[in-house]
Amino acid sequence: MPIQSICCLGAGYVGGPTMAMIAAKCPGIQVTVADLNEQRIAAWNSETLPVYEPGLDAVVASAIGRNLHFTTDIRAAIAAADLIFVSVGTPTKSYGIGAGRAADLRYIEAAARLIAEVSEGNKIIVEKSTIPVKTATAIKSILAANSPNGATFQVLSNPEFLAEGTAIQDLESPDRILIGGEATQEGQAAVEALVSVYENWIPRERILTTNLWSSELSKLVANAFLAQRISSINSISALCEATGADVDEVARAIGMDSRIGSKFLKASVGFGGSCFQKDILNLVYLCDTFNLPHVAEYWRQVVHLNDWQKSRFVEKIVRTLYNTVNGKRIAILGFAFKKDTNDTRESAAIQVCRDLLHERAHLAIYDPRVDATTIQQDLAAAGVDPALIITNVEICSEPYAAVTGAHALATLTEWDEFRSLDLPHIHSLMLKPAFVFDGRAVLCMEDLVAQGFEAFVIGKGA
Ligand code: UDX
Ligand code: ADP
């Protein structure tokens, strides 16, 4: 039976854009995105979407009200659907067994229990959230044990590979779609049903089908490999600074080797985002669980290096500002974990700002897309005393306000607008010596020096 009605549990950064694209590309399928969070659903139904993503507004506008719906009526959405995507959050566990490493699957479990309770007939359940390997087994056993109406289920894994900031492009023309299912006849029929949804706009040869575990594991491994490349180049950024080499030149030189490739070699103050650290920690936990301590340790180093990169950036600032930032105004440009998103989850800016606040700096923070409340909440969640946030954090609505009277400026997100900042004007607004710490290499070292700044750019030797 072709899929006529899709429901997605979770209207977040993954569920919202992904379902909007499916609805836009498949006018014959009704797509309903359901979330517990009333505010989030109201925002999806408004002019101001809860997720900032270039091109998303137009995709949503093309389908909303036609075959794309956002609702808090989760039960009705489940009941009406042939196929249910589960795209709820899977944060790292902060308590108990596996704390700080394992994924917290309580939202997945709650979603599975609700699906079991409400469903009738045959339904296909699709894991979209990043999850540890073998979660499908857990979902299956919950569904099988809790279905009062005798519903039957096929569970598929269909990990999402979109990156924030380029989500629309990634959804429109993905490198590949991965679908894992069981080898049974029913399992394969479910796989084919989902394949036919994607075939509305994606060539069949880019749709890979595997068994469930390969699909689940591939998602973790893809993110681990990507994060590993960043930690590798970041480790080299420190060596470049020490030796006088330029990390961008090194990245270009090695990237032209087609076996290495040029992407994901941009040195930075550290990777962030909701996936990389979480997925590596999941992988580490998995390896520990299967008694593979050497493999676990290998991947753990990718996260350690990332933490070190963030702390050495803070140390660089403190040491350069004559070993104290106490009472000094530092302009922070960029708070999102990367450009073109309003998402701050695991952003390097959080740790950098926290550590500077613990040194008693005064921060003037500007980000073009992140709102003040999010910044304040992130800092509080990172352990900064709320009283210190009130006294020592100012949120600015433009970069020049942030740098006015500042001892130093630090760029922490690679927003395009930072590349064309008026450097002479900034220099005139800052205290002297005017220090710049560019954690994203968005500013040109030669220009900075020419304008009279004391400049540090990540990965550039003096
Ligand atoms: C990532 C994966 O790319 C995506 O496939 C998966 O579905 C989810 O996780 P995302 O976290 O949205 O996507 O963004 P990504 O572009 O991968 O960037 C992650 C972090 O790495 C950002 O903080 C970014 O600034 C940083 N980064 C990326 C670098 O520091 N250098 C690079 O060369 C690339
Ligand atoms: P992601 O980046 O993976 O999309 P988010 O945290 O942005 O993660 O979104 C996950 C969403 O899932 C949140 O909006 C949350 O309210 C929602 N959610 C959690 N549990 C359920 C559930 N049982 N049913 C529907 N939505 C849920």
Image: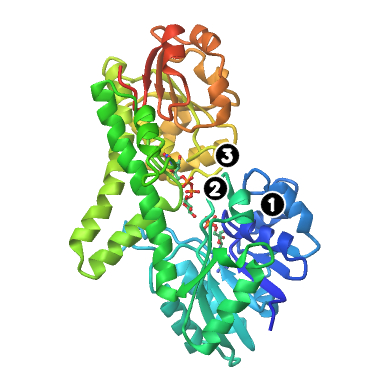
Mark 3, other Cα within 10 Å: few <14 / some 14–19 / many ≥20? some
Count of numbered marks: 3
Residue that badge 3 annotates:
340
Residue displayed at 51% across by 75% down: 156
Quadrant (top left/top right/bottom left/bottom right) for the C terminus: top left
Q: Secondary structure at mark 3?
A: loop
Amino acid carrying mark 1 in the image: Ala
Q: Nearer the viewer, mark 2 or mark 1?
A: 2
Residue 319 against residue 122 in the figure, above or below? above
Tell me the residue that label 2 is attached to: 164
The amino acid type, in three-letter code, at marker 2 is Glu
Distance of label 3 from label 1 (alpha carbons)? 19 Å
Task: Give percent across and percent down for residue 325.
Answer: 33, 20
Q: What is the crowding at mark 1: few (fewer than 14 residues within 10 Å), some, or many (at least 20)?
A: some
Q: Secondary structure at mark 2?
A: loop
Q: Are marks 2 and 3 in contact (CB under 8 Å)?
A: yes
Closer-to-camera residue (412/188): 188
Which label was assigned to residue 43?
1
Residue 73 sits in quarter: bottom right
Residue type for callout 3:
Asp
Q: Is residue 432 left or right of residue 78?
A: left
From the top left corner, tell me how far across and down residue 71 is, in percent: 70, 64
Q: Is residue 277 visible?
A: no
For ligand 2, give the image quadrant.
Answer: bottom right
Q: Position of residue 78 (x, y in %)?
A: 65, 76
Query: Would you say the beta carbon of the disc 1 residue lies within 8 angstroms of ligand 2?
Result: no
N-terminal label among 2 and 3: 2
Whether ligand 1 has any atom under 8 Å from the Cβ at mark 2 is answered as yes
